[in-house]
Amino acid sequence: MELVLATAIGVMTGCGVWLILRPRTYQVIVGLSLLSYAVNLFIFGVGGVKTNVPPILVDGVPNSTLADPVPQALVLTAIVIGFATTALFLVVLLASRGLTGTDHVDGRNDPR
Amino acid sequence: MSGWTHHLIIAPILVPLVVAALLLFFDERQRVVKAMISLASTLILVAVSLALLRIESGPNDFDGVYLLGNWAAPFGIVLVLDALSALMLLLAALLSVAALVFSLARWHAVGAHFHTMFQLLLVGLNGAFLTGDLFNLFVFFEVMLAASYGLLLHGSGPLRVKAGMHYIAVNLAAALLFLIGVSLIYGTAGTLNMADLAARIPDIEPDRRMLMEAGAGVLGIAFLIKAGMWPLCFWLPTAYSAASAPVAGIFAIMSKLGIYIILRLTMLLFGEGPSAGFGADVLLYGGIATLIFGTVGVLASQALGRLAGFSVLVSSGTLLMVLGINDGAISSGALLYLVSSTLTISAFFMLIELVERGQDAGAIVLAVTMEAYGDADDDEPEEGDGVTMPGTMAILGICFAACGILLSGLPPLSGFIAKFAMLSAMMGTGAIGVPPTAAVWVLVTLVILSGIAALISMTRAGIRTFWSSLEGTVPRVLVIEIVPVMFLLFLTLALTVQAGPAMQYMDTTIRSLSNPRIYIDAVRNAAPVADYDGVSSTNAGSK
Amino acid sequence: MAGATALLSLLIVASFYPSVTNGGVLRFEGTWLPQLGLNFTLRMDGFAWLFSMLIAGIGFLVVVYARYYMSEDDPVPRFFSFLLAFMGAMLGIVISGNVILLSVFWELTSIFSFLLISYWHNNAAARDGARMALTITGIGGFCLLIGLLLLGNIVGSYDLDKILAAGDVIRGHSLYVPALVFILLGALTKSAQFPFHFWLPNAMSAPTPVSAYLHSATMVKAGVFLLVRFWPVLSGTYEWFYLVGLAGIITLVLGAYFAMFQQDLKGLLAYSTISHLGLITTLLSLGSPLATVAAIFHMVNHATFKASLFMAAGIIDHETGTRDMRRLSGLFRYLPITGTLAMVASAAMAGVPLLNGFLSKEMFFAEAVETHADSILDRILPYVATLASAFSVAYSLRFIHTVFFGPPPTDLPKPKPHEPPRWMRFPIDLLVVACLIVGIIPAISIGPFLHTAVVSVLGPETPEYSLSIWHGVNLPLIMSAIALVGGTLLYLSLRKYLATCEDGPPILRNLKGQRIFERVLVEVSWRWARSLERRFGTRNLQPQLRWVVATGFLAGLLPLYLSGFETRDIAFSGIDPAFAAIWLLGICLAFGTAYLAKYHRLAALVMLGGVGLIVCITFVWLSAPDLAITQLLVEIVTTVLILLGLRWLPKRTEGLAESITLRARFRRFRDLALAVVCGIGMTFIAYAVMTMPVPDTIANYFLENAYSQGGGRNVVNVILVDFRGFDTLGEIAVLGVVALTVFALLRRFRPADDSMDLPEQQRIQNSFDEDRPERSAGDTVRDYLLVPSVIMTWLFPVIITFAVYIFMRGHDMPGGGFSAGLTLSIAFLLQYLAGGTRWAEDRLRILPLRWMGAGILTASATGIGAWFFGYPFLTSHFQYVELPLIGKMPAATALLFDLGVFSLVVGSTVLILVALAHQSIRINRLRAIDAARTEEG
Amino acid sequence: MMQSAADMPVWAAIAVAFFLLIGSGLALIGAIGFLRLPTFYERIHAPTLGTSWGIGGVMLASMIFFTVSSGRPVFHELLIGIFVTVTTPITFMLLARAALHRDRAEGNGNVPDKPNRSQPAGEDLGESDPRKG
Amino acid sequence: MLPYPLLTLLLILMWLLLNGFTRGHLVLGVLVAVFASWAMASLRPDKPRLVKWYLLPKLFGIVLYDIVKSNIAVARIILRSGRRSHNPGFLTVPLDIENHTAIAVLAVVLTSTPGSAWLEYDSNDRTVLLHVLDIDNEAEWRDTIKNRYEKLLMEIFA
Amino acid sequence: MSAIILFSAVSIAQLMLAAAMAIASLRMFRGPRAQDRIIGLDTLYINAMLLLVTFGIGTGRVIYFEAALVMGMLGFVATVALAKFLMRGEVIE
Ligand code: NA
Ligand code: NA
């Protein structure tokens, strides 16, 4: 499982990095989204990968078998903040597009 | 726990937060009310941080650890007030008063929700200064950043939006690095509390510690982006110079937040123990590169705004270098330098707007956009509430000269005192008989060169601005705009005159930082409030 | 007022005389920065006293002079305040008892001199001169500071007395040479010694009183003052002799040589000053006590005659309107008294007997012929001294002869010069009288004071010296005679040439230090800086992000590499095939997203949604249902948000204008490589950390106490609202402030011109409707949404109920305030989707700002509530309450906190969505405005 | 709280397995159809297999399983079925209508006419081949 | 007070399905449902007049049966689609019902049933365009829609 | 016995659903037109939801129900917005 998850994280990171290095604002925002998926999974993963364990307290199940709730809480916060910043970046790229007339990240008007 | 005064620790976060929320209930048209509430909040913050500083440096053994939610240390989030955080809080509060007063002349009116965002920026800053928890630090970092995005974009216009986009993109990337770093640290050390982490480091087995260090490295990059280390700093001059004047004025402390965190964490985590000295080289060389780049940029800047922006880099570079050396005496001087340069740069950013008014491209852009957008719900900036100044040019000139003197580290203002304090520790009486090493020579040369560059650049700019303009119209400057600038400059003067006590405070601060045990024990030994019935809080039901 | 101040300080200084005679020292100690040995220590000894007298005395005279010199139009108060400030700083240098304090005053003189030189800042020459002076002396000041710091390092104190007492230690220390070099850099720049001399002539654009003060008695004297001050501890070494001597001798000759060829009166005086300072420096370099006596004596003398000469030049300038010696001539008939005074003063400058200049020059000659250190420098010194002296005779003669004698002037800007007011001339009178008195009866007039000064510098080393005008016919006298005769001859031979020649000496005319300096300054501080900034900086986003990514990568992997980290073996076991299959899909979708994002935005968005979905499934698979729900909801809202934005982005078509340059190809390849290594690195680290045995984490505490003390079974939620509720408070603040930013920014939003039109689809559909008589505008969209909107409307209460359910469940089961808030927002969003903005807002008055405010307030108030029970902020309380009808219900303050979260999330999300949605309406208004404008125009 | 799967009566297990396989089988068939059918308008029929009895089967399986295993009636899966049934048509309707519009605008033939004279719309939407479909 | 009693009832049912039946949840469910219906009222939707609401189960049964049938049919078509066993086509059906809710129900029914898809409704000539996967007998399709569904719907929604 | 039956049924069901998801994503890649991709996403959602339910059966936990419910109830919102964008070029008018 770890291998699959790690590979998935790596691939999303790679794709995200590639995209945020592109010149178009839309590519950047998509790249940031991919990166935040990767990072969220990463945070989640550091708590140890456990399948098929109860995610909430259940009587009679020893606590040690439960999934680590801390990374989950962190991911939740990260998701929310990621959502907020994505929205913000979107609006800023729109504003930039409106003011410069182009969707280039530097406001340049080249066809690349 | 000493009753109500103990809750004072959290006031720097709560006051602006509650005020920000309250401000949302007022219409944009009730601007005066909003401004007054906002101003009151910043004044309260000054009072609170003064009180905290007093208490902190006072004689009685103040318990500066605040257990949020009454959870014991590594489990809940703690706020920690020590000499360093108290100092930063005060600095932030002072800057905020100045910037806010400045904004009341016109800037607070050119866009929506200025005051709310301003207050939330303070929430973020103060929270970051106070928190003793890594992830909570992330959260407050984000609060601060989010507010800073809004404030940077405040007033809109192509320059701001472009700068804002770059700023946001880079900082979003930084936030991701932050998360990676924090989670790596949690995954390897099993804790998020800084003190607990510091205490755990010696017990972490090597394999895991390596990963922990990798996490710390990634985390460090996030902070270094904020602090503006070369080559992660290119956004900074652009963003700061594009921001409206009061915003840039308060931004002056944001890059210092990066420095603050690095200082805190390196002293706490890597001061001693198996990971001691981790990353010091990076800070040293990065600082050198930053200082060189900042200096070059200061020289190369035509626009005052960029000059000021690069001055931020110079200041950051200097501080990073000192952090890389990690010598107590030098660090004390560096703290003084931090305070002085923050005050200076803040004043300078606001001053620039006044000086350039009339020939200011930003104002023209603003005017154009205001006209083109012609939104009914957009309010014209109100001019004329307040009194314009007599002898404007003279006062502006004096302030400008003061900024120049401060930036280049010429005597007698605090810029000099601070540089002297650092240099003296490196090669003066602070290092009697120890011949300066090659590194020290490099540092000294760079510090001096950066001062020279500032001198050259500031005289060039000053002459161009004040003396060569062809019968330039005297800018319309309101009293409430120049007073904040003068206030900040006055603070540097006060810092100069009171250099002795100030330096003593810095010394104490650095001394307590270099003994992380104090911090660690304070946090780990802080006990939650006992229950009503006197039983400690391990009881079910209520706690 | 200014005069009174100057006079008062003069008197005060004078009154200290009794205390400083015979090596007495007056000290005042004030603490400033005691930790670092920087104290406000003032210390006056004989030497300082003499200098202070000079400063205050000449200061007073200059003030008196300036009172009449300055025009009514000039802002005089500024002038006098600067002048007095300068005087104060200069006095400060002299009486500093702490070397750092000295350097403080040192830089202050630079700053005030800058302001004084640039006093007439409308004049470009004044600005440039001032700037150059500040740059050179300022840099010198920094060097001085370093030197002094090094002294502090050697001695262990910045106290002047301690330093002066540690001469042997200093000279023997390995840091002696660097300290010396830096201190000399400070002193030589200030005293305008070669090769830093060029700023002084350019500073002549200053008002003449300033020149008279700064460039005769004070500013430039600071440098030699410093040399004298540290003479006891620094001099007497080979390095000292060479460095100081070389600079001094070259300056001495070169200054005098340049002075001869100046056409500007003040220029001549400036170069002569340089030369005389060179003389003093040379004297000091010799390291002999007698030479030092001569140096001190010459400082005083030079100050008196040079100040008076400057003032005289000022009067000439004032009266004739020019200082160009080619235009001046025969002024004696108009200005007889001034002329006489000037003649006496220049005679003193030339070293004519019976004047003070002669005495010190004699002493100089006497020292020059002595042998101090056997070197070429020493051997040539007598000849050089004589030569320079001859030059000085020549230029002094020229000054007098050209200006006051010869035919009456023809083309003066002010045709009728006449004697200045009585009081304007008074300072010159006084100074010239002083020259005469000192020159004739030196032992009585200046003797005691000089002795006091010398003793304080040399202490027990004070040599025997005699201040008489006649020492018999000796070598110095012969040298003087040669110089006088030679100088006169030289002048006579050059007279013709000088009457018409260009400014500056013949051969070196084009080699102007000033020009070189300026070119270098522009080159280095401007062109180089700019190209460096461009080369090592960027204003584009992509390189910045590249750096961020690259450094992030290095920061993560370099520590691992350096510490020799080894990951565990890769384990393929334990992989759930379905999970692997799903992620195979996810990986493909991620690649697809990356591939399509440029030209197929919608497709990329769809695939991104797919990736998000798979992330969400992963969360479920790995036992984190809370995350899954939140991820899903966020995914939905984000998709809609991006779609709302997509409308305003430019159309992008593939294949057009696609000519990839080699550079672009390289860039792409580099980015690809970076992306690949980052991906691999991330995989590596993720795998490493995930396969590592879990450490003893704080999680165990949460698992154990979530129910017993947090009152919830959903540990994640208990962490969010209780254990780490403070994070959540911050997190909702982020969301709130972002919403406000979005709102504020969109109020100013104006789409690009090519997005202003209606989308093409709508135009087609509208024209379709318009073309048909039986249809009315908007029928198509109404029909289109007819069925969906009915269903979406009926879903509204259902989703609300569901939101309440998610909210209520949060503490025990997956859910919570955040998810509930998003759910409710989606309910609102659906209504906007179904009916359009107007329809929805006609029916639903959502006040997002209120929701947000209430949210933060509720959450904060919940936290503050704990205070009243004596607990810290956010301490939660939990208990079961017995309610009628319902029965036993859990009631936790955390729920209230979560309510705040809920409220804020609803407000923020709706605010963002609505602000974006409103653009479609706003654009109609903008279009209308534009249309109206076009009609008008 | 819950019994383990092994404690479940065999008939219930078989019933659960049956419905589960029916449901997921239909979903798979629907997906296959979605892949294989040649035109867009045909393709939209296929996924409804999944959204109708595909869901039905899985929900039934789940209801039986949880009812039996927890010993009390568990019906909340019904809600999922209801909501999917109600909401999926919205998507399909909107999309099909959009496709219709695009085909008409581009003059792609094979769709019932509501003629209009406008020019084709829609780049930027991710088509690789606008002729097909 | 209760603008949409049936809706309120259904919401209470939903609440109980979600939370399980307890007395507390009943009370809570009522509160929530009333609140949600009140929120619904603010949207001012066209209020459907349910006349013969008791026919709803009948409709429900019919649809369920048809869906099973067409599931099998469509599955067969898909599995044999290599041989092009079906004959897809468009179908225009004039409708008599006007009530939007009723139309919506019809649309949901037709779309949920595999093999038929609701494409567009034209409010001017009140026709609906359908796409049918296997249109062997156009008339039979029309008949099913008009008589099997629409008639029933017209009875339910007067 | 029951355990074997259930386990194998759930495994097969999961694999079938995963295959269905794969096919749906294939459509998302292949298109050819935007509407195909969007339906692909919708199908992906539905199958993912079914997968969650089978997962719940497999683990015997009701805890996954909410996630499935959210998918079933709100998953269509994204696709509706996409569809509307396709039709009108604008999501909210
Ligand atoms: Na600015
Ligand atoms: Na169908």
Image (tube, coloured by chain):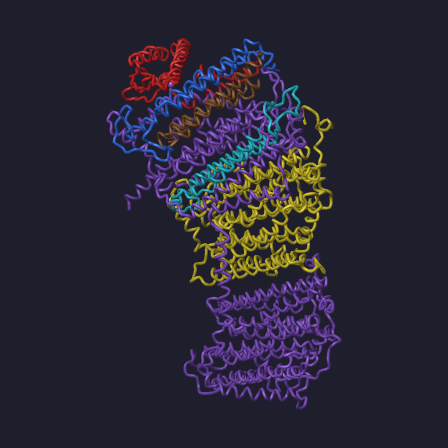
Drawing shade for chain B = yellow
Does C44 sit left or right of C585 as displayed? right
Percent x, y of residue E136: 30, 14
Chain identifier matching the blue colour in the rendered picture: D
Chain identifier matching the cyan colour in the rendered picture: A
Relative to B464, is C639 above or below?
A: above
Percent x, y of residue F38: 41, 28
Drawing shade for chain F = brown
Relative to B250, is C488 above or below?
A: below
Name the residue furthest right.
C460
> Which picture quadrant has residue E133?
top left
Q: Nearer the viewer, residue D44 or B30?
A: D44
Drawing shade for chain E = red
Drawing shade for chain C = purple
Relative to C526, is C872 above or below?
A: above
Percent x, y of residue C91: 64, 69
Q: Is residue B390 visible?
A: no
